Image: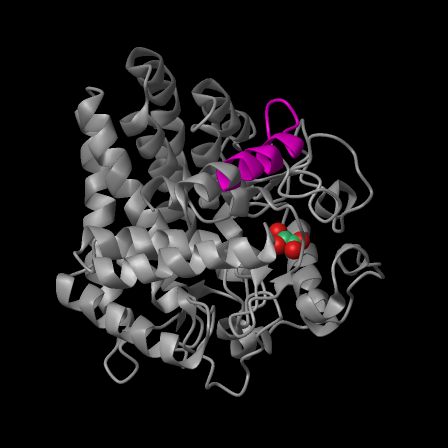
Amino acid sequence: MTAITHADFIDRAVEVLKENDQGAYTIPTKGLYPFQWNWDSCFTALGQAHYDEARAWTEIETLFEHQWPDGMVPHIVFHVWNDGYFPGPDVWKTGRPVATSGITQPAVAGFAVKRLYDRARNKAEAARRARALLPKIDAWHRWFYDSRDPRGEGLVAIIHPWESGRDNSIDWDEAFERVPTHGVEPYVRRDTQHADPAHRPTKAQYDRYLWLVQHFRGLGWDNARLHDASPFQIVDPGFNAILIRSSSDLADLALELGEPALASLNRARAEKGIAAMERLWSEPQQQYLCLDRVTGKLIDSRSIGGLMPVFAGIPKARADSIARTIEKLAEQCTYIVPSHEPSDPRFDSKRYWRGPVWLVVNYMIADGLTARGETAVADRISRSSLRLIEESGFAEYYDPMDGAPLGGGRFTWTAAMVIEFLRKA
Ligand code: DGY
């Protein structure tokens, strides 16, 4: 792209961010996702900071205003009633003053806040706002290890696929067989009215998503009970990598802002996590794999979740192997990085997290590879991401074979990532 098109694409990305801005939080896209989503907001803030730093801090502060007393930060905040989304507050019934869901999402906030602070033009203001968020993010991290790693293994489990953000990944297929569907209350999906059903999870998966929600609701959303009571407990390397990176970034930031005790707690969590991650490495696959905590076995499924640990401080040799694995993936598709290995018969280039490319994942992988000196592969990922935008606009996700735009359109976090990629291009 030329310098002129850079400016043009940034303008168009800012337009998307602004049209989805609700004042103090941003919706991912109109129609399909009409509320505030946790990790979407943290990535969104990075894009907003390019044109309005104060607004970017507000995005994350609003999210943390809805943190639960036990430290959890919910995956959706239902700020304003909208019946265009299912399942809404009447299904979750979490009893919060402002309705929220009852599960969480990848812990991007620690990473995002550090990045906002590092780049801040107004350092004094950034320090003030970061200092107020530090204990809240730390409480969320503590919650993760208390509630989702009850035996102190160093890695946390997700108890619902929606927590990973990779809702219908092939990684969950086998474990999902254990989740029953009897007793699921009748429901009408709204997502398939906004997006092509062929790009979305199946009904069989939705039945199980809802069974889990009803099961946790029946346990009063008591996080002291949910992990052990869930038939679905998966240690996802990607999810853990984000938490580890955020813990490590929070430790650096806390040290800089004069909070050494908070820094050491987060440093210790990150170091323990990196050491524990070794258990998930697969030599034959040259990437990490998910662990099914119920069976104690690694899951033979080569998804993006196993490449994302490069975003955390894994050993250099592992980061290099992941770069080689991505080069092999690039031989099989036109656009990288596909969310699943294309030679797997379960791969589906159009269905949500079973094959399509997602720019937020590309961003994290490219960031990690750059930090480890694998700049050629990182640049290749950035170029591929920008080509997708150029050819297919600001879609929710993209077909890695033909680049077709998929899911929702005019998508906030995609726009935010475009600004981030162009910043370096
Ligand atoms: C959805 O509804 O598709 C979301 O991914 C759940 O958070």
Q: Is residue 40 left or right of residue 117?
A: right
Where residue 183 sits: x, y (%)?
A: 78, 66
Task: Please check the rendered image and state whether residue 82 is part of the magenta-colored stretch, yes or no.
Answer: no
What colouring method underlies this structural image? one colour
Outermost residue, top direction?
A: 124
Q: Nearer the viewer, residue 168 or 349?
A: 349
* In this view, 391 is above or below 123: below
* In this view, 213 is above or below 288: above
Residue 340 in sight: yes
Residue 150 in sight: no
Characterize the magenta stretch by its predominant secondary structure.
helix
Q: Nearer the viewer, residue 56 or 181?
A: 56
Where residue 103 sits: x, y (%)?
A: 56, 48
Q: Residue at x 62, y 70 (%)?
A: 351
Q: Residue at x 47, y 26 (%)?
A: 56
Q: Nearer the viewer, residue 135 or 330?
A: 330
Where residue 410 sits: x, y (%)?
A: 64, 46
Q: Nearer the viewer, residue 189 or 348?
A: 348
Magenta highlight range: 9-25
Q: Residue at x 66, y 32 (%)?
A: 19
* In this view, 267 is above or below 159: above
Q: How many marks?
A: 0
Task: Please check the rendered image and state whether residue 19 is part of the magenta-colored stretch, yes or no.
Answer: yes
Where residue 154 sits: x, y (%)?
A: 28, 55
Q: Is residue 155 left or right of residue 346?
A: left
Q: Quadrant of residue 353?
A: bottom right
Q: Residue at x 46, y 18 (%)?
A: 54
